[in-house]
Amino acid sequence: MISLKKIIASNYFLFFIGIFFGIYLALAVLKYYTTTEVFRAPPSQGNYKTYSFTHDDLIRTYDVYIPSTLKKNASVFFLLHASRGNSKDMRSSTGYDFEYLAEEKGFLVVYPQGFKNHWNDCRATADYAANIQDIDDVGYFLQMIKSLQENYMINRKQLVVSGISNGGHMVFKLAHEIPKDILLYTSFAANLPVQDNNDCSLSQEEVNMIIFNGTNDPINPYEGGLVSILGNDSRGFVISAEETYNYWRGLTSYEEEKIVTIPQLDSDSKTFVIKRESIGSKYVALYSLVNGGHIYASPYLKSSRFAGESVRDINGAEEIYATYLELIDNKIVLRKYNNQYCYDGDTCYVTVDGVNHKIRLLELDTPEISKPKCKQEYEWGIEARDYINNSIANAKSIKFVTNYNKDYFGRYLAYLIIDGVNISETIISKKLGVLYKKNKKMDWCNVNSNFFD
């Protein structure tokens, strides 16, 4: 029998001890570089539940944080995890920011779960199973919404989806393929893939979009380039953060752009935030997290060393929620369609609550363009339309006065105030239209041509 002393002294024992120590050291180093510190525990008031359903013969799940203050007809904020992540990790990865905010505001927080911890986003060459097997994550997302409607009677018009990294790319896919289903899309640490590597169906429809990207991101290059994770380059190339912002902005009819530098909260940090926002038919913004890494920005997080520098100057959840409030505040914004703000002299294109609509101007009737009864009516209609479009294009201020009632055709009824003047009154004074009378439609074909002189 071999003695214990001889076993310990043998080269085999030392070899196995070396392997064990090496594995331990490697795991310790890995933990050191990949651990994110969270500076608070999850809120204790609400409930956390997991739901499942079958989609495309696969059992899919999602988790829900239900705040103790949940409102009826609640809004929903979805949070999509990163590569190799999961729904539960996404809670701590966002510092529980959305859950604490949900307790204050009464909305649902939903953490979807990707297939084998990944999402089938737009990057055609990615080598993870969700992409290779072409998993229907868009269909999964839509079925998840139906499930939430059945369980919680959610407000279908007030959905916000956010994601980080692979989850941020999935946000882009949802924006491309179901642009009308979500009120606000927000993405962290992701740029759009180059055109040759984008296999999504591009609707080219405008959406509300916020992008948060670190300028020193070691994985998703801020200036564009190859996405590489520990030597895995299969995800391919992406365009820059600014080009990504310009893509979404270019789908809208934007009226103005603002650029602000957000003050530093941490004077010892080298990070700060530049916010660039485009305001028009839709809202599009780019938060440049200067010197920040591959991160979600929050005062309650210290990102892993692998991900790069943390940014604690803003709370991502609060920034998103502030935009959400603007979008649901019955806000009416003019938009362009076929390069026109107004289809004719009394009907204009707008968005209300971030949804495209038309608006009918009160106390005004102008000649018809779509179905004129004579050439004269059509020509006068074009003149009225051109006048109101030119007035809008050259306006210094535009306001709407409305109680949000709709007409028979579903158009909002409102006064349009341009530079402090009711445009209905101006058009009438210039004899480009008349005062609207409900049961006495103007016969433009029998109006003397001198009427408009």
Image: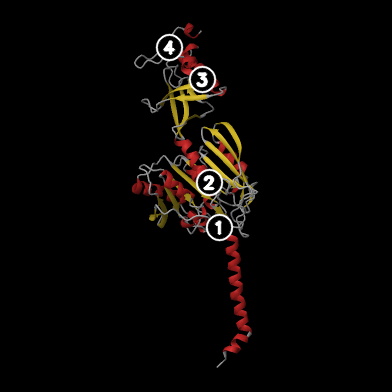
Amino acid tagged 3: Gly
Labels 2 and 3: the sequence-earlier one: 2
Labels 1 and 3: the sequence-earlier one: 1
User: Where does residue 17 sit, x and y in percent of width and height?
Assistant: 60, 78
Q: Secondary structure at mark 2?
A: helix
Q: Which residue is mark 3?
A: 420
Q: CA distance from mark 1 to mark 2?
A: 16 Å
**Which numbered disc covers residue 116?**
none
User: Where does residue 246 sit, x and y in percent of width and height?
Assistant: 59, 39
Q: CA distance from mark 4 to mark 2?
A: 58 Å
Amino acid tagged 1: Thr
Q: Residues within 10 Å of mark 4 (few under 14, many from 20)?
A: some
Q: Residues within 10 Å of mark 3 (few under 14, many from 20)?
A: few
Q: Which residue is mark 1?
A: 36
Q: Which residue is mark 4?
A: 445
Q: Secondary structure at mark 1?
A: loop
Q: CA distance from mark 1 to mark 4?
A: 73 Å
Q: Secondary structure at mark 3?
A: loop
**Which numbered disc covers residue 316?**
2
Labels 1 and 4: the sequence-earlier one: 1
Q: Residues within 10 Å of mark 2 (few under 14, many from 20)?
A: many
